Amino acid sequence: MSAGPLVGYSSSGSEDEDEAEAEIEAATEGRTRPGAGHCRRGQSPDPSQRFPVPDSVLNMFPSTEERPEDDSAKHGGRVRTFPHERGNWATHVYLPYEAREEFLELLDLLLPHAQTYVPRLVRMEAFHLSLSQSVVLRHHWILPFVQALKDRMASFQRFFFTANRVKIYTNQEKTRCVPLIPSHYQKKNLWTFVGLEVTSGHAECLDLVSEVDRVMEEFDLTTFYPDPSFHISLAWCVGDARPQLEGQCLQELQEILDEFEDSEMLLRVLTEQVRCKSGNKFFSLPLK
Protein backbone atom coordinates (compact mmCIF):
# COMPACT_ATOMS: atom_id res chain seq x y z
CA MET A 1 0.00 0.00 0.00
CA SER A 2 1.46 3.31 -0.98
CA ALA A 3 1.65 6.16 1.48
CA GLY A 4 -1.25 8.49 0.81
CA PRO A 5 -2.42 11.71 2.41
CA LEU A 6 -4.93 11.27 5.23
CA VAL A 7 -6.34 14.70 4.57
CA GLY A 8 -5.92 17.26 1.86
CA TYR A 9 -4.39 20.62 2.41
CA SER A 10 -4.84 24.13 1.24
CA SER A 11 -1.91 26.42 0.74
CA SER A 12 -1.97 29.83 -0.85
CA GLY A 13 1.24 28.93 -2.63
CA SER A 14 0.39 25.39 -3.70
CA GLU A 15 -1.08 26.29 -7.08
CA ASP A 16 1.81 28.62 -7.78
CA GLU A 17 4.28 25.88 -6.83
CA ASP A 18 2.53 23.32 -9.06
CA GLU A 19 2.52 25.77 -11.95
CA ALA A 20 6.17 26.59 -11.37
CA GLU A 21 7.09 22.91 -11.35
CA ALA A 22 5.18 22.42 -14.62
CA GLU A 23 7.07 25.28 -16.20
CA ILE A 24 10.42 23.91 -14.99
CA GLU A 25 9.58 20.49 -16.39
CA ALA A 26 8.53 22.00 -19.71
CA ALA A 27 11.69 24.06 -19.88
CA THR A 28 13.98 21.10 -19.23
CA GLU A 29 12.22 19.11 -21.97
CA GLY A 30 12.41 21.99 -24.44
CA ARG A 31 8.62 22.32 -24.58
CA THR A 32 6.41 25.36 -24.31
CA ARG A 33 3.55 25.24 -21.88
CA PRO A 34 0.15 25.16 -23.55
CA GLY A 35 -1.06 28.69 -23.99
CA ALA A 36 2.36 30.19 -23.31
CA GLY A 37 3.08 33.21 -25.49
CA HIS A 38 -0.59 33.67 -26.42
CA CYS A 39 -2.84 36.17 -24.77
CA ARG A 40 -6.21 34.63 -23.98
CA ARG A 41 -9.33 36.67 -23.32
CA GLY A 42 -9.18 38.20 -19.86
CA GLN A 43 -5.40 37.69 -19.59
CA SER A 44 -2.82 40.46 -19.38
CA PRO A 45 -0.53 40.81 -22.40
CA ASP A 46 3.03 39.55 -22.36
CA PRO A 47 5.13 41.66 -19.93
CA SER A 48 7.51 42.60 -22.76
CA GLN A 49 4.60 44.17 -24.62
CA ARG A 50 3.51 46.41 -21.74
CA PHE A 51 4.44 50.05 -21.37
CA PRO A 52 7.13 50.56 -18.70
CA VAL A 53 5.91 51.82 -15.32
CA PRO A 54 7.54 55.12 -14.32
CA ASP A 55 10.02 54.95 -11.44
CA SER A 56 8.03 57.56 -9.56
CA VAL A 57 5.10 55.17 -9.43
CA LEU A 58 7.20 52.11 -8.53
CA ASN A 59 8.78 53.98 -5.62
CA MET A 60 5.34 54.49 -4.14
CA PHE A 61 5.16 50.74 -3.49
CA PRO A 62 8.54 49.59 -2.11
CA SER A 63 7.31 46.06 -1.43
CA THR A 64 4.31 44.40 -3.03
CA GLU A 65 4.90 40.99 -1.44
CA GLU A 66 3.46 40.52 2.03
CA ARG A 67 5.00 37.99 4.39
CA PRO A 68 2.90 36.16 6.96
CA GLU A 69 2.90 37.98 10.28
CA ASP A 70 4.57 36.14 13.14
CA ASP A 71 3.04 37.56 16.31
CA SER A 72 4.36 35.58 19.26
CA ALA A 73 1.59 37.01 21.45
CA LYS A 74 -0.88 34.94 19.42
CA HIS A 75 1.05 31.74 20.16
CA GLY A 76 1.59 31.88 23.91
CA GLY A 77 4.96 33.64 23.62
CA ARG A 78 6.36 31.17 21.09
CA VAL A 79 8.38 32.19 18.06
CA ARG A 80 9.25 30.10 15.03
CA THR A 81 12.28 27.83 15.12
CA PHE A 82 12.86 28.86 11.50
CA PRO A 83 11.59 31.83 9.47
CA HIS A 84 8.45 31.37 7.42
CA GLU A 85 9.38 31.08 3.75
CA ARG A 86 7.23 30.02 0.88
CA GLY A 87 8.12 26.44 -0.01
CA ASN A 88 9.44 25.59 3.49
CA TRP A 89 7.40 22.85 5.18
CA ALA A 90 7.78 22.01 8.88
CA THR A 91 7.96 18.20 8.99
CA HIS A 92 7.63 15.78 11.91
CA VAL A 93 7.50 11.96 12.19
CA TYR A 94 5.58 10.41 15.07
CA LEU A 95 3.29 7.69 16.40
CA PRO A 96 -0.27 9.00 16.70
CA TYR A 97 -2.30 8.42 19.84
CA GLU A 98 -6.06 8.59 19.37
CA ALA A 99 -7.44 9.77 22.71
CA ARG A 100 -10.46 7.78 23.82
CA GLU A 101 -13.12 9.11 26.16
CA GLU A 102 -11.54 7.34 29.14
CA PHE A 103 -8.18 8.96 28.42
CA LEU A 104 -9.79 12.40 28.36
CA GLU A 105 -11.49 11.60 31.66
CA LEU A 106 -8.10 10.76 33.15
CA LEU A 107 -6.70 14.00 31.76
CA ASP A 108 -9.61 15.88 33.32
CA LEU A 109 -8.32 14.64 36.69
CA LEU A 110 -4.61 15.16 36.09
CA LEU A 111 -4.60 18.62 34.52
CA PRO A 112 -6.75 20.50 37.07
CA HIS A 113 -4.64 19.01 39.87
CA ALA A 114 -1.42 20.12 38.19
CA GLN A 115 -2.95 23.56 37.62
CA THR A 116 -3.33 24.00 41.37
CA TYR A 117 0.49 24.16 41.36
CA VAL A 118 0.97 25.86 37.96
CA PRO A 119 -2.24 27.60 36.80
CA ARG A 120 -0.78 28.53 33.39
CA LEU A 121 -0.57 24.90 32.20
CA VAL A 122 -2.40 24.36 28.90
CA ARG A 123 -3.79 21.07 27.62
CA MET A 124 -2.31 19.67 24.41
CA GLU A 125 -4.61 19.84 21.40
CA ALA A 126 -3.51 16.41 20.11
CA PHE A 127 -1.44 13.53 21.45
CA HIS A 128 1.44 11.62 19.92
CA LEU A 129 4.86 10.08 20.51
CA SER A 130 7.67 11.75 18.56
CA LEU A 131 10.12 9.80 16.41
CA SER A 132 11.92 12.82 14.98
CA GLN A 133 12.73 16.42 15.61
CA SER A 134 10.89 19.04 13.60
CA VAL A 135 12.81 19.61 10.37
CA VAL A 136 12.35 21.80 7.30
CA LEU A 137 11.57 20.22 3.92
CA ARG A 138 11.34 21.97 0.60
CA HIS A 139 8.07 21.40 -1.22
CA HIS A 140 9.57 19.14 -3.88
CA TRP A 141 11.22 16.91 -1.24
CA ILE A 142 8.00 15.91 0.50
CA LEU A 143 6.93 12.94 -1.63
CA PRO A 144 10.48 11.47 -1.97
CA PHE A 145 10.93 11.87 1.79
CA VAL A 146 7.64 10.10 2.55
CA GLN A 147 8.45 7.32 0.08
CA ALA A 148 11.82 6.80 1.75
CA LEU A 149 10.06 6.55 5.12
CA LYS A 150 7.54 4.09 3.68
CA ASP A 151 10.36 1.89 2.38
CA ARG A 152 12.06 1.92 5.78
CA MET A 153 8.84 1.12 7.68
CA ALA A 154 7.73 -1.70 5.35
CA SER A 155 9.34 -4.49 7.39
CA PHE A 156 8.16 -3.33 10.85
CA GLN A 157 5.55 -5.28 12.75
CA ARG A 158 2.84 -3.66 14.86
CA PHE A 159 3.63 -3.57 18.55
CA PHE A 160 2.32 -2.43 21.94
CA PHE A 161 3.87 0.23 24.13
CA THR A 162 2.82 1.39 27.58
CA ALA A 163 3.08 5.03 28.73
CA ASN A 164 2.06 5.13 32.38
CA ARG A 165 4.75 7.10 34.23
CA VAL A 166 4.09 10.81 34.80
CA LYS A 167 7.20 12.84 34.08
CA ILE A 168 8.08 16.53 33.84
CA TYR A 169 10.14 17.73 30.87
CA THR A 170 11.71 20.98 29.71
CA ASN A 171 13.19 21.88 26.34
CA GLN A 172 16.57 22.36 28.02
CA GLU A 173 16.90 18.59 28.22
CA LYS A 174 18.08 18.40 24.63
CA THR A 175 18.95 14.70 24.79
CA ARG A 176 15.82 13.56 26.56
CA CYS A 177 12.75 15.14 25.04
CA VAL A 178 11.18 16.87 22.09
CA PRO A 179 9.15 20.08 22.17
CA LEU A 180 5.62 18.90 21.52
CA ILE A 181 3.88 22.23 21.24
CA PRO A 182 3.27 23.19 17.57
CA SER A 183 6.38 22.04 15.80
CA HIS A 184 7.50 25.23 14.05
CA TYR A 185 7.29 27.44 17.17
CA GLN A 186 9.74 27.73 20.02
CA LYS A 187 9.91 29.89 23.13
CA LYS A 188 13.00 32.10 23.20
CA ASN A 189 14.03 30.68 26.58
CA LEU A 190 12.27 27.48 27.63
CA TRP A 191 8.98 25.84 28.41
CA THR A 192 7.83 22.94 30.58
CA PHE A 193 5.45 20.15 29.82
CA VAL A 194 3.84 17.21 31.60
CA GLY A 195 4.10 13.88 29.85
CA LEU A 196 3.49 10.15 30.19
CA GLU A 197 6.79 8.32 29.76
CA VAL A 198 6.97 5.01 27.91
CA THR A 199 7.78 2.16 30.32
CA SER A 200 7.50 -0.77 27.88
CA GLY A 201 8.00 -0.84 24.12
CA HIS A 202 11.05 1.42 24.37
CA ALA A 203 13.24 -0.90 22.28
CA GLU A 204 10.70 -1.00 19.44
CA CYS A 205 10.47 2.79 19.46
CA LEU A 206 14.26 3.00 19.26
CA ASP A 207 14.24 0.68 16.24
CA LEU A 208 11.77 2.98 14.49
CA VAL A 209 13.87 6.04 15.32
CA SER A 210 16.93 4.32 13.86
CA GLU A 211 15.17 3.93 10.51
CA VAL A 212 13.75 7.46 10.60
CA ASP A 213 17.25 8.78 11.32
CA ARG A 214 18.58 7.01 8.23
CA VAL A 215 16.03 8.83 6.11
CA MET A 216 16.96 12.12 7.78
CA GLU A 217 20.61 11.50 6.92
CA GLU A 218 19.71 10.76 3.29
CA PHE A 219 18.13 14.20 3.07
CA ASP A 220 20.86 15.89 5.14
CA LEU A 221 18.43 16.68 7.97
CA THR A 222 18.83 16.67 11.75
CA THR A 223 18.47 13.26 13.40
CA PHE A 224 16.70 12.48 16.67
CA TYR A 225 18.11 13.09 20.15
CA PRO A 226 20.40 10.41 21.61
CA ASP A 227 18.98 8.36 24.49
CA PRO A 228 15.44 9.75 24.07
CA SER A 229 12.72 9.56 26.71
CA PHE A 230 9.71 8.51 24.63
CA HIS A 231 6.49 9.99 25.93
CA ILE A 232 3.05 11.36 25.21
CA SER A 233 2.80 14.99 26.19
CA LEU A 234 -0.34 16.07 28.07
CA ALA A 235 0.10 19.77 28.88
CA TRP A 236 2.64 22.56 28.55
CA CYS A 237 3.44 26.04 29.79
CA VAL A 238 5.95 28.78 29.10
CA GLY A 239 8.89 28.97 31.49
CA ASP A 240 10.55 26.56 33.89
CA ALA A 241 7.84 25.09 36.14
CA ARG A 242 9.87 22.14 37.41
CA PRO A 243 10.25 23.51 40.95
CA GLN A 244 6.45 23.57 41.33
CA LEU A 245 5.63 20.37 39.43
CA GLU A 246 8.35 17.98 40.55
CA GLY A 247 8.32 16.48 44.02
CA GLN A 248 4.94 16.46 45.76
CA CYS A 249 2.87 17.42 42.70
CA LEU A 250 4.48 14.73 40.54
CA GLN A 251 3.88 12.11 43.22
CA GLU A 252 0.22 13.11 43.51
CA LEU A 253 -0.26 13.01 39.74
CA GLN A 254 1.19 9.50 39.63
CA GLU A 255 -1.17 8.41 42.42
CA ILE A 256 -4.15 9.78 40.48
CA LEU A 257 -3.07 7.82 37.42
CA ASP A 258 -2.41 4.59 39.33
CA GLU A 259 -5.81 4.76 41.03
CA PHE A 260 -7.72 5.50 37.83
CA GLU A 261 -9.92 2.56 36.82
CA ASP A 262 -8.43 0.43 34.02
CA SER A 263 -5.48 2.81 33.59
CA GLU A 264 -3.18 -0.15 32.87
CA MET A 265 -5.17 -1.16 29.80
CA LEU A 266 -5.98 2.43 28.82
CA LEU A 267 -2.32 3.39 28.58
CA ARG A 268 -1.26 0.22 26.71
CA VAL A 269 -1.22 1.40 23.10
CA LEU A 270 -1.23 -0.70 19.92
CA THR A 271 1.00 0.96 17.34
CA GLU A 272 -0.44 0.34 13.88
CA GLN A 273 1.09 3.16 11.88
CA VAL A 274 3.78 5.79 11.73
CA ARG A 275 2.60 9.20 10.65
CA CYS A 276 4.43 12.03 8.93
CA LYS A 277 3.12 15.60 9.07
CA SER A 278 4.54 18.08 6.58
CA GLY A 279 2.99 21.51 6.73
CA ASN A 280 -0.71 20.74 6.97
CA LYS A 281 -0.48 17.51 4.99
CA PHE A 282 -0.52 14.12 6.74
CA PHE A 283 0.83 10.78 5.51
CA SER A 284 0.06 7.41 7.11
CA LEU A 285 2.69 4.65 6.95
CA PRO A 286 1.02 1.39 8.08
CA LEU A 287 3.01 -1.24 9.98
CA LYS A 288 2.65 -4.95 9.19
Image: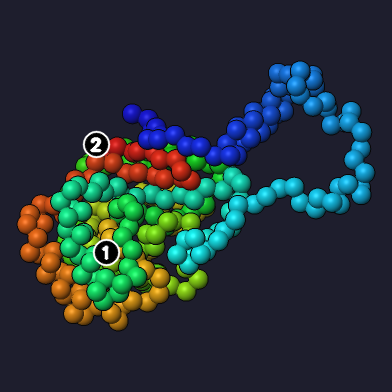
Residue 223: percent from left, percent from top: 43, 57
The structure residue drawn at horizontal position 20% and vertical position 59%, both measured from the top left corner, is 108
* Residue 97 appears in the picture as rendered: yes
Q: Position of 224 compared to 168: left or right?
A: right
The residue where tag 1 is placed is 195
Q: Residue at x 83, y 25 (%)?
A: 45
Check disc 1 and give the amino acid type: Gly
Callout 2 crowding tier (Cα within 10 Å): few <14, some 14–19, many ≥20: few
Mark 2: secondary structure: loop
Q: Which mark is residue 288?
A: 2
Label 2 to label 1, Cα distance in Å?
A: 28 Å
Which is nearer the eye, 41 or 254? 41
Apparent side of residue 219 relative to residue 271 in the rendered image (left or right): right
Q: Amino acid at mark 2?
A: Lys
Location of the C terminus (image quadrant) = top left
Q: In the rendered view, would you say 119 is above or below 79?
A: below
